[in-house]
Amino acid sequence: MMKKVGEVVLLWLLILFIQIAAGEGYSPPGKPTNISCRSPEKETFTCWWQPGSDGGLPTTYALYYRKEGSERVFECPDYKTAGKNSCFFSKNVTSIWVNYNITVVATNSMGNTFSNPVDIDVVYIVKPNPPEEVVVSVTEDKDWPFLQVSWKPPKMADTRSGWITLIYEVRLKLENENKWEELSAGQRKIFKIYSLRSGGTYDVQVRCKPDHGFWSEWSPTTRVKVPEYLPQERSMWILIVVFAAFILIICIWMIYMNFHSVKHYLLPPVPGPKIKGIDKQLLKSGKSEDIFSSLVVSNFPPTTSNYEDFLVQYLEVYVPEERELIMDEGKDLQDDSFKTENSTCDNDSGRGSCDSHTLLIDKGGGDKDDGQQTDQEGSQAEAETKSHEEVMEEEHLACCHENAQIPNISKEKEKVKSWPSLFSPLPQYSLSPVNRPNKPKMGNQHCLSDGLFTPNSLSSYFTQPGPSTTKGFRSNYWECSLDHKQSHLLHPQTAAHEHLQAENDLNAAYVDYMGAPLDVHELSVRPTEYVEVQRVSDEDVVLLHPVTPSQENSYTVSHQTEDYSRVRMVNNNNGLLLLQRDDIEEEKNMCPYEEEMVSRATSTGCRASVTPTLQNSATGINTALPILDEKAASGYVDTATMFGLPTY
Amino acid sequence: MGAKCSKRAKKTATGPRRRRRRNRLRTCRTDERTMAQRRISGGKLFITAVYLVAMCRAVPVNDLLDRASQRSDKMHSLSTLLTQEMDSHFPPYGRMQMPRPADCHTSILQTPNDKEQALQVSESDLMSLARSLLRGWVDPLAVLSTNAITLPHPAKSSISSKIQELQEHSKSLADGLDILSGKMGPAAQTISFLPYTGGTDLGQDRVTILNKFNFLLSCLRRDSHKIDSFLKVLRCRAAKLQPELC
């Protein structure tokens, strides 16, 4: 009974003891791990291990090794030299080309634990010490310095006898960089580094490795500074800046010189309105009533039954006799005139459309004879007028300017595309106002008042031929012309208004005589309703020929040689001074010139009128009256715009 | 002869006698010159011959040793790669569980065990050791080569190519060492016979074959290291003229 109780108590005590022991965490030690051995010189070696948990109890470690070919177990001779958890094998106990079987045992009061055995051969675990005495020097070499790194092998390694063969490696980096640059040096102990940064500071390290082994640790860093050897780059930058500034100045200068063309290219000017009959000044003044009144055509839609009136806008008067004379006179001038005209006129400049007078000649008067007579009679006047050719040309030019858009002559193959084209080739009239010095800009002889010449009025004029009036007309014309010339002579540069007054007077004089029929024909009086401008001679003479309704073909001109008159000039009121022509052949001879003249005229047809005749009339027909030539007295055709468009 | 020439030249000569004497003088001088030239050429020849002999003896040995050590270094690197390649698919842990095979067939050859012993060995003995080891591995390499083709290992093709390369290196190194040993004396000529008794067949089952293959490769690795070490010691000993190498 007592024994049993004792056993029970003992059992309880044992259980308690065990429980206490377990509760406090006592256990056998953990297994040592990571046994690694290294030999610095292939003569000795050291092994380290990682201890496991100690089990809460003081644990001791022991290393046992066994050599190859022998079962004898040795314990580590030296636990202290190499530090904690290590074993140092001295030369005496180190054999090479022999396998070592090493085991580490952890022991504590609870038990012991064996680590996994490790087989090593000393020759395979060589890891030398870092190289020693690393010296880095900066060596100057023709202003290109380089680093010379020299070192010594670690003391322990016996490289002299060839026992260990070491391979070296150098690495360097700039002071403030993170990445090293590694360079292999082979078996040499001196290494040169080129391509250094001027003024930089370098860190240099060296390490070594046996031919079959592990790399050593890097040697301590050696710092060295490279002197400044590169020339300052400021001079180059200064040069670049100066050069760039120079180029910039040149570019600015070029742009400045070509400012207008550049501006024109980038910002093309906005074209102005080109509506016929629109007066720009009126637009600016803001009087809409006036503007629109100018647009309003009282006679539109045309009441005339015959629509051919509108088709035929040119009065062609063929005066063959006078043509030659005029041609001879004006040949020289035409060339110049053409050139100047071509140079100065541009059709679409956007600076304001040209005067858009459309000269309309509904019916050609039969003033061919008158034209002839005027030519003959006016030979003297011609001589006189020659001196005033400049003025006349100017006037003609003014007329040209005004007459911008003239519809083509449909009936004639030799089409005159624009009214100014008809007049531009007129002799000595094609003068650019700019070039002539003494040209009075106001040199406009208003022998005809504006607004008087509507198609109907023209037709009325032409349908009522009266021989008596033509002569009177002619004389009056001459008077006009002479007066006008005189006015020009006396006042070559009179003011615009004065000129206008004179012109208006002349116009008034003209008007009176314009009442007379124009188609007074010496040879035959034939009422002809239509006058076509057959062509424009090279003398800037518009050849007109009357066309009867039954005779629309231009080739029937031959029968109407008498009726042709040549347009001598154009007056400011878009009046065509017609000259009579007798010879068709002459007219025909002039055919080849027409195209040329027409082409030239078209280029110059759209010139802005220089005349200050803007203020003349509400209808705005302000054309400069050319100096009336005696030749033109007979063949005068007033060509007002159909719609009475104002001039510019 | 020179004295004779000088005596004759002392007398002054006039007229035809002068010419005769001059001629005699000329011939005398030319004779002297030729004799001197012959002497000089002979001396030069002799010196060059001696120099060549001396040079032929010293420099080529050092250069040959350098080349030999480089080849042995390459051999050892190859064998190290082979073992690593074998272990990549055959962990050493598994290998350790198998019973260790017997020692390498070359273990009968007495080689130094540490540095002091190695440095005390003479050059001729070192050369002999190296040559013996090299000769002893000719057959095993052949066995390895034949077995590598059918080796139950995923990297057998790479292993096979490396073994073939090893064979080539071994052959050329053996030839080079034969030439070198001829210059080093009779002791270098002796080669210990290290027979391989393992047979051509490595085993029947996969594990046995692999185990034996591994064992042979480890033996090869060690022996190639020995050869490399011996030759490098020899190189540094012969490179007294070029201390920067060692």
Image: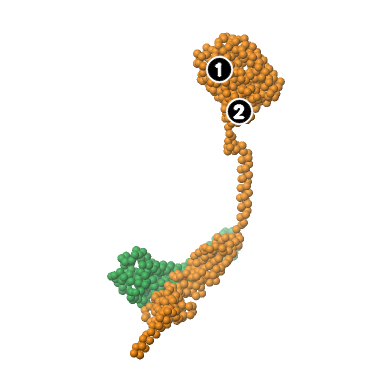
Pinpoint the chain carrying mark 1: A
The residue singled out by tag 2 in the image is A288
- In front here: A391 or A474? A474
The residue singled out by tag 1 in the image is A362
Which secondary structure, mark 2?
helix
Residue A69 position (above or below residue A640): below
Instruction: Kindly indicate whether the residues beneath marks 1 and 2 are on one polypeptide chain.
Output: yes
Can residue B37 be seen at all in this image of the molecule?
no
Q: Which of the chains is orange? A: A
- In front here: B138 or A216? A216
Asked whether the beta carbons under mark 1 and mark 2 sit within 8 Å of each other, the answer is no
Q: Position of residue A99 (x, y in %)?
A: 39, 76
- Which of the 4 image quarters holds residue A464? top right
Q: Position of residue B168 (x, y in %)?
A: 37, 66
The residue under label 1 is which amino acid type? Answer: Asp
- In front here: B142 or A134? A134
Q: In the displayed image of the protein, which residue is found farthest to the bottom?
A: A2
Which secondary structure, mark 1?
loop
- Which of the 4 image quarters holds residue A514? top right
Counting residues from the start of the chain, the first of labels 1 and 2 encountered is 2
Q: Residue at x 52, y 70 (%)?
A: A219
Task: Give the side of residue A50 with respect to residue A462, left or right.
Answer: left
Q: Which of the chains is green? A: B
